[in-house]
Image (spheres, rainbow, N blue to C red):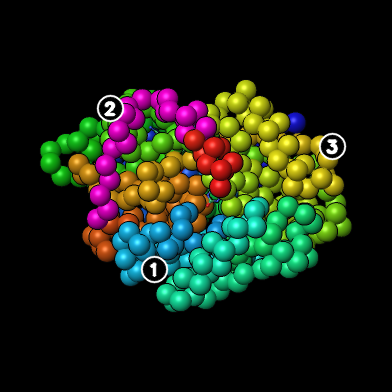
Amino acid sequence: MKLDSYWTDSAPAFAAQAHELPAQVDVAIVGGGFTGLSAALALAKRGASVAVLEAGERVAAEASGRNGGHVNNGLAVDYADVAAKVGVDKARAWYRAYDDAVDTVARLVRDEAIDCDFMRHGKLKLATRPHQMAALERSAGRLVGDGVDTDVEILDAAQVRNEVQSERFHGGLLYKRSGQMHMGRFAKGLAEAAERNGAQIHTGTSVQRIERLGRGQTHRLHTGRGIVTAQQVLLATGATRHGSYGSFGWLRRRIVPIGSFIVVTEPLGAERAQALLAARRTYTTVANIHHYFRLTADHRLVFGGRARFSVSSPQADAASGEILRTGLEETFPQLRGVRLDYCWGGLVDVTQDRLPHAGERDGLFYSTGYSGHGTQMSVLMGERMAAVMAGDASANPWRGREWRAIPGHLGPPWFLPAVGLYFRLKDRLA
Ligand SMILES: Cc1cc2nc3c(=O)[nH]c(=O)nc-3n(C[C@H](O)[C@H](O)[C@H](O)COP(=O)(O)OP(=O)(O)OC[C@H]3O[C@@H](n4cnc5c(N)ncnc54)[C@H](O)[C@@H]3O)c2cc1C
């Protein structure tokens, strides 16, 4: 079993053109995940000189290359809860931003001819306990009733069993606008498109400190390879921790990096895979500590979940792999003993209200906090932040949201085991 992401291992690596680090650019983007690459493409298309500064040796090797492969629509939290807090109009606009986000991915795949198995077969949210069906029905009713999403449908237990070969589920809620893709191949295509349009991509370039020049947006970025001065800077750093605490401290006090873990089986063969998940959708289960799964084009099962409340490391990933194997075999007993070829973990950039935050602070632009629902939103927000940086603040669907620091969150997330225990208890009592 490889302790590595299937998406990066099974895609050809993007090879950045060799460039000296430029002394000066219009825009420096810190981070070469989907947010950074999408922004680079959009900014370069607008004629800006752009440098993406990525600490890792490979682009999109953190969350963007380590996720579950779902490109789902819908909010990460219940629409009705959000509507109760902020009102129907705002909640509807935020929900629709995810529709736009999936559409944006689809458009880029088409326009930039990215070969990444993108398809829109929908997402099925599965009830693991009978009483959860009432909540799913309520959700569907609100989405249709408020005119938010008419492409949703309740499937009863028999309908679910027709397409999911498991006895575990009592029904589900189908979101028909959701999609999926091969994350490694999408990353390569997106990076190539950005470069084709004139953006420079510098891997192995960790930004350690950012110094503001005057009171405007011009900044000097101190990297491991030298200094870059930029008229504007976009922080697209996700949940990973590079560089000194000082320059990124404000963001870090607002984001909890939570480990999520994934295993991928050996290829199951076309027939067995088809029998397992006939509709080839993305699937999530209803629980605080939930599972998510889907098939790949080469007929493997990708099965993920929170598994343990710890930060990803080779030991944590391997231990989580064993926990996930149990979850996988409980869900699909017919796969007992199946070989697991991959196991990895990654950090999810979770915010307190599990909604994204994007804007400008102290002359620095940022977009982050997608809370496990970011493969599509990061791509949309890269484009939208390019428009914001060109002067159109209204392009940002998340503008004007108050963002308080998480009390007591000053360094490494010491509270994760306690959070894990809390959610596990909550699931047991639900
Ligand atoms: C295990 C897992 C499963 C997930 N599953 C799904 C899913 O199925 N569907 C979904 O929608 N979302 C999912 N997500 C979330 C989604 O992958 C992310 O929200 C999204 O990829 C974030 O993109 P990003 O570009 O903002 O951040 P990232 O992809 O994390 O990119 C940030 C980049 O910034 C770089 N960086 C950080 N600091 C510096 C610095 N100082 N200098 C230079 N570079 C720096 C990092 O090296 C990194 O490459 C999952 C996440 C994880 C971890």
Q: Is residue 275 above or below residue 410?
A: below
Res. 168 mark: none
What residue is drawn where x is 51% and y is 67%? 138
> Toward the viewer: 59 or 291?
291
Label 2 and label 1: CA atoms lie apart by 37 Å
Give the magenta range: 400-421
- The residue under the point 49% across, 75% down is 144
In the image, 419: left or right of 283? left
User: Looking at the image, which is closer to me, 128 or 73?
Assistant: 128
Estimate the x, y position of residue 3 in percent, counting from the top left: 67, 30
Q: Is residue 249 left or right of residue 142?
A: left
The circle on residue 337 is 3
Q: Nearer the viewer, residue 112 or 150?
A: 150
Count residues near mark 1 (Cα–Cα under 10 Å), then give few for <14, some for 14-19, many for 20+: many
First reached walking from the N terminus: tag 1 or tag 3 = 1
Mark closest to the chain's N terminus, 2 or 1: 1
Q: What numbered label is drawn on residue 92? A: 1
Majority secondary structure of magenta residues: loop
Q: Secondary structure at mark 3?
A: loop
Mark 3 or mark 2: which comes first in sequence? Answer: 2
Amino acid at circle 2: Gly
Please name the amino acid that badge 1 sits on.
Arg
406 drawn magenta: yes
Q: Which residue is mark 2?
A: 246
| Residue 280 drawn at (x, y percent) | 72, 60
Q: In which quadrant of the rendered view does residue 85 lie?
A: bottom left
The amino acid pointed to by label 3 is Gly
